[in-house]
Image: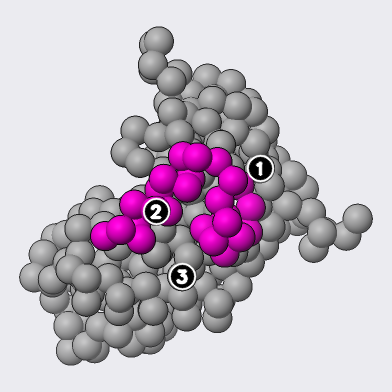
Amino acid sequence: MTIDDQPLLSARGISKMYGQHVGCTDVSFDLFAGEVLAVVGESGSGKSTLLSVLSTRLEPTGGAVSYRMRDGTMRDVFALNEAERRLLMRTDWGFVHQDAREGLRMGISAGGNVGERLMAVGSRHYGEIRSTALDWLGRVEIDLTRVDDAPKTFSGGMRQRLQIARNLVTQPRLVFMDEPTGGLDVSVQARLLDLLRGLVADLGLAVIIVTHDLAVARLLSHRIMVMRAGRVIETGLTDQVLDDPREPYTQLLVSSVLQV
């Protein structure tokens, strides 16, 4: 087996308990380079808990998450020391929050938000940092004249696009997305989804996206996992699962969308 045939991320038996309450239980899957996996389900299904564990924001109660480093070795992400984990989050991984304020420094400029991540990986030349920041603002369709404006002056859609630029500027291989279009107007959602789809394809990103919106899952993902009460109840190619769902719960999810 070559490195390209190996998973980028491998989850085995992931469980997270909050006392007697089940966050998620016995979740296993492999994610490959360039693959987009959507995790869908109603509120409380466990999808956000799973994303938090996979991205090391929560320690699992059981199971293991392994990641293929750039040297080809698979490492248990929870066995990494704090410095290694922090470096991974700054370089190979990105995390796009539903509320962009959680992923941005609201008091510093748009260019500073993008440049800060570059500085975290060793960039020091101001001119090069600013030039790269301007390039990325253009790529996410933010007017370059806003480079010195703080994100607190931006609309919700602009903040989300800025958060995406901040995450992608270091050319990560894996990006976690938590309801990235949630809370935005429909027209803003459509523009953002079109932008995301283009960037993911152009950069060959692997993505795990949590969403309750099946239209988002269909547009962005190659594969889908349906969660209910903390468990994965159905998984497969996105179009296959959404067009011909096997499980009654998935059928109900799909039919509820069609009836809207």
Residue 152 location in percent, x, y?
A: 11, 64
Tell me the magenta residue range: 235-260
Question: Which of the 4 image quarters holds residue 108?
Answer: bottom left
Gap between marks 2 and 1 measured at Cα: 26 Å
Q: What residue is shown at x 34% (from left), y 80% (from top)? A: 140
The first of marks 2 and 1 along the sequence is: 1
157 to the left or right of 190: left
Main SS, magenta residues: helix
Residue 169 location in percent, x, y?
A: 44, 71
Residue that carries the numbered disc 1 in the rendered image: 29
Q: Which amino acid type is shown beneath numbered disc 2?
A: Ser
Residue 219, labelled with which disc? Answer: 3
Q: Is residue 257 magenta?
A: yes
Q: What residue is shown at x 39% (from left), y 64% (from top)? A: 215
Judged from the image, the secondary structure of the residue bearing numbered disc 2 is helix
Above or below — where is 228 with respect to 131? above
Residue 218 location in percent, x, y?
A: 48, 65
